[in-house]
Structure formats: structure tokens, C-alpha cells
Image (tube, coloured by chain):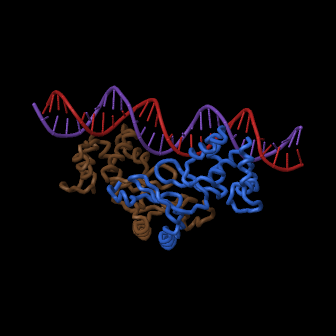
Chain colours: A blue, B brown, C red, D purple
DNA sequence: CACAGAAATGCGAGCTGGCTGCAACAAGCA
DNA sequence: TGCTTGTTGCAGCCAGCTCGCATTTCTGTG
């Protein structure tokens, strides 16, 4: 699979420890006893290159365009592993499949339940809620995991749902 | 099924239009072309009597303790119908099944992703977020549909996920 | 009270999203 | 080069939910 070399060639400067590039994540993975494989490199490549909010199935399709033999279950297992390492997080933006993105993308999501539109919201939109939850309940929120459902400007509250 | 009569006997004063009792919801249902059936009455009974946050499966089990033949798919269909009427809403409190409760219960949910503890939060905890989302995005939030994930006081942020 | 038309139900099959056990394979060290 | 052990492909499984269809039940009408 010559494509791997091609992909690896664009890895950024060596020596970094933060998981901010494909190669640095691979190093992190290896430092934990993991191994560097084709499917992992390709998956990370997709995650670093493409946008956020892609489902496991979409990521699998992308990976498979380079390496058709990579199985969906491998994608799931690798996403799990990357999540354990803190490199990737998944979010639920609605009733469908989960979406995955790099943990460095820290925005939350507003999803319109009428038209399905999705807005990315900077994490500080949730600042007041975070403070109130902490103050009233000692609860530290992670506003990224589940989308906040509602109605976008265009569909403003036609029903209660 | 004599039990129906028994259940019907506790229906509250006649003539009300708001769906605030089993019988008033049944009237609403019938005014929309729906029909009053045993399973619907029992299901509503469970919803009005028991606490919130019950799954379709749990509600089915309760209904089946009175009427063993009521099928799970009937529960789902009736919950859908009640949701269309605005009587019931469902919420996702985690990765498991959805939970159903009366639309009159307006609290949101804080779920700890370490220990799974669930806190009910009054809707006004989300007041600031609601204002900010409206102001910045013209987005009207419904904070009840998806739980806000995080870490409760006891589990305070031992890991990132 | 019986009847007809329509709505609801029971049942089983099917679907989506995701996970698992296992044998074969391959990464990386010696 | 060979060994150890992590990883993969595959197939099958599981939960949660939905659907099609024949049968039953509700309810207004005659």
C-alpha cells in the first residue's frame, strides 16, 4: 500500500507530544502499547483533514476509498481507542448515528428539530449554564456531547414537539 | 375487562379541555378522530401516576401487569400519538433507550457520565443559555430533549470522557 | 341492537446503529 | 528471521425501534 507513505510524508515536524497531527497521535498510540497500522493512519488522516460531524459510516467510506478492505468494525474499534486516548470525541446531534471529531474542536451544537439544521456554538455560549450547574448542583457540564435541541430562526417554534 | 371501569372511575371532573388527566387526554384524542382503547387508558394511567423518565419497555411492563396482551409496539405507537398531540415528550438521558414523561414536566436533565447519576434541573437553569442562543443565533432551545452530560459532584472530572 | 367503516392492535419480521468472539494476520522487538 | 502480542476481517449478535398485514375493536349510523 504505497498510499501510506504518501500520507505519512505530510506528517508535521517530529518531536511533538500533543496529539495535533496524524503522526503525533500515532506516536501517542504507540507509547501506550498500541501499534501503527494502515487503517489507523488513514482514519486519523480523515479526522484531521475533513470537517467535524462525520459518522463512523462516513469515516469508513472515506478510509475505504484509499483502503477498501478496512472493515466498519475496525473503524468503530479505532474510534473507541482514540476516544479512550482523548484524541477524539463523539457527539449525538439528533436521533441518528453519533458523529465523531477531534477533541480539540470544542464547540457545542444547536440542532433544529424542524428542519434539522445544525449550528455550531462556541463553548462559551454555555458559560452561564456551566456556572449555574456548578453553583447549584456541583455539576461540571460537557455541553458538547449531546446537542441542544430547539428551533432555528427560520422554523421558530411552530410546534411544541 | 372490568379494570377499565375501575380506572375510568378516577377520572377527574368532566368538561375540561386541558390534557391534565387521563380522561381529558382521552377526550382530546377522540376529538382528533382517535379512539379510546384499553391500552391507551392504561398507558395514560401509568404516565399520570408514575414518575417521569420511564422507558417504553418499562411502561409496557406496567401496562402489561393489568393487561398482559398489550404489545410493546402498541406502546410505541401510542407514545408516538401522544407525542404528536403534545401530551407526552421523550428525552434522551444517555446512550440507552429514550424515556417518556408528560409534557407538563418541564425540567431538564444533568447526567453524570462517570456514575450515571441523573439530576433533574428546573428549566430556568437554562435561562441564560436560552437568552444567549436566542440573541446570538435566533435559536429557541428546548433543553429538555437531550440531557446535558458532565460529571456530578461525586465524580468531578476524573477523566476527560 | 346490529352493522359498516375506520382506527387500533397483535404479531412477526425487518431495520439501523453498534458491539463481540474468533481465527488469521501483521507490527515491532530481539 | 522469528516470536509475541496487538489488530483486523468477518460473521453473527444485540438493543431499540419501526413496519406490514391480517384481525380485532371502537363508535357513529340505520
**Which residue is at the front of the view, D19 or B153?**
D19
Please say whether residue B80 is visible from this viewpoint: yes
Quadrant containing the N terminus of chain A is top right
Quadrant containing the C terminus of chain A is bottom left
Total tally of numbered discs in the picture: 0
The residue positioned 23% from the left and 46% from the top of the image is B30
**Residue B33 quadrant:** top left
Q: Is residue A55 left or right of residue B86?
A: right
Image spot of residue A84 (x, y percent): 65, 55
Please say whether residue B122 is visible from this viewpoint: no
**Which residue is at the front of the view, B3 or D22?**
D22
Q: Is residue A45 left or right of residue B50?
A: right
Image spot of residue C5 (x, y percent): 21, 32
Above or below C14: residue B151 = below
Q: Is residue B124 left or right of residue C4?
A: right
Q: Is residue A150 left or right of residue D13?
A: left
Image spot of residue A133 (x, y percent): 49, 69
**Which residue is at the front of the view, A142 or B120?**
A142
Image spot of residue B114 (x, y percent): 58, 59
Amino acid at each position: 500500500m504505497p498510499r501510506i507513505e504518501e500520507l505519512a510524508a505530510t506528517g508535521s515536524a517530529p518531536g511533538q507530544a500533543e496529539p495535533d497531527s496524524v503522526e503525533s497521535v500515532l506516536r501517542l498510540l504507540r507509547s501506550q502499547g498500541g501499534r501503527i497500522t494502515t487503517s489507523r493512519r488513514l482514519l486519523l488522516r480523515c479526522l484531521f483533514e475533513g470537517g467535524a460531524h462525520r459518522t463512523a459510516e462516513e469515516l469508513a467510506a472515506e478510509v475505504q476509498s484509499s483502503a477498501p478492505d478496512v472493515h466498519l468494525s475496525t473503524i468503530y474499534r479505532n474510534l473507541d481507542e482514540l476516544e479512550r486516548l482523548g484524541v477524539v470525541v463523539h457527539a449525538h446531534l439528533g436521533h441518528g448515528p453519533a458523529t465523531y471529531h477531534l477533541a480539540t474542536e470544542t464547540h457545542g451544537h444547536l440542532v433544529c428539530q424542524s428542519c434539522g439544521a445544525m449550528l455550531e456554538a462556541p463553548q462559551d455560549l454555555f458559560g452561564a449554564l456551566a456556572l449555574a450547574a456548578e453553583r447549584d448542583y456541583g455539576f461540571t457540564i460537557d455541553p458538547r456531547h449531546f446537542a441542544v435541541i430547539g428551533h432555528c430562526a427560520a422554523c421558530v417554534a411552530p410546534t411544541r414537539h
